[in-house]
Image (spheres, rainbow, N blue to C red):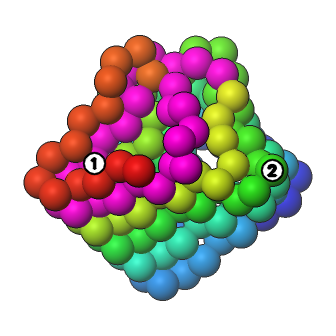
Amino acid sequence: MRGLTVYTTRTDMQLIQAAYTGTISMSNVTAQFGATSPNYHINGVSGGSVNINGNVNIQGNSASALSAQVGGSVSVQTSCTVTLVGTPAFSVGTIYAGAVGSVYLVGGFSGTATGPAYYGYQSGAFLTGGKTIPGSTAGVLASGATFS
C-alpha cells in the first residue's frame, strides 16, 4: 500500500489487517476512522505481518493504533514515523500486543494520544528501543508480556 487514505465510518472492522501469514507493506498511508471504533487502525493477527516502510498517519479514536495478536506482528522501520493526527483516544493502548503478538518500533511516533501508552498480555512483546509511546497513562503488562 502506498500513498492511500483508508477511511471508514463503520465501527465493526479493522482498518488495515494482515492475517493468516499474509504480509502488508505500507508507506505514506493515512488510516482514518470517522467514528470511534472498538477495533484497530493497523493489525497483524494469526501470523500476519504489517511492515510500515514509510510514514503513516493515524486519525480517529479506536482500541489501538498498532495491534499485533495471535502470533502476528507490526513493524515500524528505520526513519519511519507514525503520526497521530489530533489527539486520538485509544481505549486499549496506543500499541497493543497479545497472545504472542509483537510490535517492533525501529522508527517512532509523533503526536499525542489519550489512554494507555501500551497494553500487553499473554506473552505479547514490545521492542521499542527506548522510543516514547504516546498516551496519557502508563502502559500495562500482564500474563508474561514484555517491553524493552
Please state if 87 lies on the left or on the right of 110 as rendered: left
* Residue at 80% in and 50% down: 79
Q: Nearer the viewer, residue 24 or 108?
A: 108
- The circle on residue 95 is none
Q: How many marks?
A: 2
Quarter occupied by residue 30 = top right
Query: Counting other residues with Cα less than 10 Å from the Cα at mark 2, is it few (<14), some (14-19), or many (20 or more)?
Result: few
**In the structure shown, which secondary structural element does the residue marked by tag 1 occupy?**
strand
Please state if 81 lies on the left or on the right of 59 as rendered: right
Estimate the spatial distance between the alpha carbons at disc 1 and disc 2, rounded to whole Å.
25 Å
- The magenta region covers 111-134
User: What amino acid is labelled 2 in the image?
Assistant: Ser
* Residue at 32% in and 32% down: 139
Quick check: 62 above or below 107?
Answer: above
Which is nearer the N-term, disc 1 or disc 2?
A: 2
Q: Position of residue 63 (x, y in %)?
A: 38, 36
Quadrant occupied by the N terminus = bottom right
Quick check: 97 above or below 88?
Answer: below
Quarter occupied by residue 119 = top left
- The circle on residue 79 is 2
